[in-house]
Image (tube, helix red, strand yellow):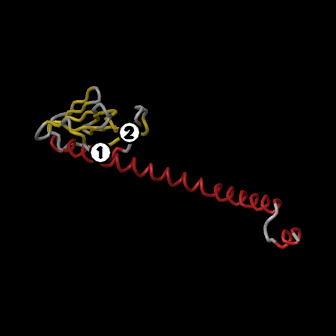
Amino acid sequence: MMIRRLRNKKGMTLTELIVAMLVMSIIMLAVTTVFLPIYNAYVNANELAEINSLLNSLSSYVMSDLENAREVPDFDDNTLVIDTRITVTYATNGDNILTRNAVPILDAGFYKRKGARIAGFTELDGVFTIELALVDRNNVEIIRRSYSAKPIGLQ
C-alpha cells in the first residue's frame, strides 16, 4: 500500500533538478555576458557626461571673467587673479573645489566626488589659455582641458 502511494506522487528526481540548475546556470551566464559590457558602457558614458558638464560649467565662469579682464591676469601657485571691474580671484580650497573670491563656484554635490583646479595659465600674443584639471579625492588628475580667450578690455 505504501509503495503504491509513493509511485503515484508526482515530483522531480534529483537528476532532473541538477539538469534544470545546469540549464539555468547556462542561461544566467549568457545574460551576464551580454549585460556587463552594456552596463560598463553606460557607466563610462555617464561618467564622461558628468565630466563634460562639470568642465563646461567651470570654464564658463572663468572664461567670462577673463574675457572682461582690464589688466593682465596674474597666475601663481594655482591662484588666478583677474582684474575686471572688480578683482576676481580663483583658487582651490582645501576640498579641491574651485572657488571665486573664496566662494565655491558650484556646490560640492555638483562635483560628485571630484575636485577642480586651475592647472596652468599662459599668454601668447594677447590670447590667454587656462588649463582646468579635474582630480579625484586622492588628488590624482582625471582629465585636463585647455580654454582660450582674448580679453576685450586689453584690446
Q: Which mark is residue 134?
A: 2
Q: Amino acid at mark 2?
A: Leu
User: Residue at 10% across / 41% down in the picture?
Assistant: 85
Q: For the residues carrying marks 2 and 1, which lies nearer the camera in this image?
A: 2
| Residue 135 location, quadrant | top left
Viewed as shown, does residue 73 lie left or right of 40?
left
Which mark is first along the chain, 1 or 2?
1
| Residue 141 location, quadrant | top left
Q: From the image, which quarter does the N terminus lie in?
A: bottom right
Badge 1 marks a residue whose secondary structure is helix
* Residue 62 point in image, percent of width and height: 25, 42
User: Residue at 84% across / 68% down in the picture?
Assistant: 6
Q: Which residue is mark 1?
A: 59
Viewed as shown, does residue 44 lie left or right of 77?
right
Q: From the image, which quarter does the C terminus lie in?
A: top left
Front residue of this view, candidates 120 and 56: 56
User: Is disc 2 surrounded by few (<14), some (14 to 19) or many (20+) residues within 10 Å?
Assistant: many
Could you tell me how far apart the alpha carbons at marks 2 and 1 are, in whole angstroms?
12 Å
